Amino acid sequence: MRLTCGGLFGGYRVPFVLLAIYLLVFLVVPVGTLIVHGFASDGGRFALDYVVLLLANPVYVESLINSLGVAAGAAFLAAALALPIAMLLWRYRVRPSVLIELCGFLPLFVPPFVLALSLQTLFGSGGPFATVLRWFGTPEPMIFGLPSVMLIEALHYFPLLLMTLIMTSSACGRQAGEAARLGVGWTRLIGRVFLPLSMPGLAFGMSITFLKALDDLATPLSLGVTNLLAPQAFFRLSAYGSRDPLSSLMACALIAVSVVAWFASVLLVRQYVVTPHVAAEPSRRQGRAGGLVFGGIVFVYAILYAGVALTSVARLWSYTALPESYAWTHYLGALSAGSGSFVNTLAYCGFAALLDVVVGLLMALAIHSASPTMKKWLSWVAAGLFSVPGVALAIAYLQFFGALDLPLTG
């Protein structure tokens, strides 16, 4: 369907113009303002004075290195957990139902700090696991520090990575089984068929894990970890305001690392993408095996999140395996005292979702109607939008829109 408006904006030019205005106002100009604040001297000229000052501070350099290490470690740990399971499921042609595949994308909707809070309850001092370990004279586990952040991020995004591997490697499953019956070893099939098929899903899942772990602010703070770049940028912003050049440089560093990681994964996906084949329906035995595997995964995550669920209904719980008494008063108190927060969350998240739908439709229409060259560039722009960290964009918005007075509104 052609969107016409007559005159200069006839044909498909309307979505292009609207999309360009949106990206200019809400992405290009704020991020450009962020870069100017980070790389401009007091006289307004381009200089590297603040870059030298940032690199001279060992705390900030350590935070940058720690952020890269935690994000990369979480991505590789999640991949190490997901790859063997995906290989076994592919080997026996076990394909989960669509509902289970959709559940694999829940990590994109549930914040990882919920898992951090749950593990603090379960493994912290006085928690059930610490109490049981104390019975056997075993030291209590420590769930604070950088390794805990990396582990929580990996566990949180593991289901997403597993589902992307399954969805991309399920093609050619029947052909691989037939080749195995003809005498081709499964080790060779995994190396020649499974890994190339799963490479797009692996790259996508690892890049999402890397970007989300790099950008995460709530999880490190909930564990008392501050020597990461996102918390340091938050502290600088809180202490010195949105005009602070060092917080701008930290945000620029987050954007640069995220863009490089995201586009590297996109190039890898484009390089290994294959034409999918229709996967054969698994047998009843294979379906039962798949149900057992995914049932075990659900059981493990139910235990991991049990800390939050039990704490929400516990009246008295200290140094015992389970709460000593239960009550629903916590829910009533949260609804009465935090009703305004719930309303604000629903209102602002709902508005953001609606705005995303409108912008997504405009971008889809613009990409669909563009020339091949322009379609390629718009696709890269759409992919690049996902690589901008939320913390960095928040700092950019505070700098740009905080000093902007709208006409007639003040």
Image (cartoon, rainbow, N blue to C red):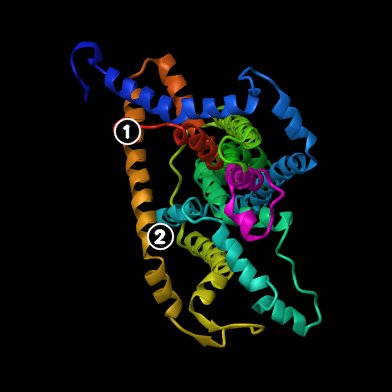
Q: What stretch is highlighted in magenta?
A: 211-239
Badge number at residue 361 = 1
Predominant SS along the magenta part: helix
State the residue at coordinates (52%, 45%).
164
Does the magenta-highlighted stretch encompass residue 41? no
Quick one: quadrant of the C terminus? top left
Residue 10 position within the rendered picture, expressed as x and y whole percent measured from the top left: 22, 15
Looking at the image, is mark 2 or mark 1 nearer the viewer?
2
Kindly tell me whether residue 147 is visible in this rendering: yes
Secondary structure under the numbered disc 1 in the rendered image: helix
Does the magenta-highlighted stretch encompass residue 228? yes
Q: What residue type is labelled 1?
A: Leu
State the residue at coordinates (59%, 50%).
217
Residue 50 position within the rendered picture, expressed as x and y whole percent measured from the top left: 70, 29
Question: Measured along the vertical axis of the image, is residue 37 above or below residue 393?
Answer: above
Q: Which amino acid does label 2 sit on?
A: Ser
Q: Mark 2 points at which residue?
A: 341
Question: Measured along the vertical axis of the image, is residue 226 above or below residue 256?
Answer: below
Outermost residue toward the bottom in this view: 324
Camera-side residue: 332 or 91?
332
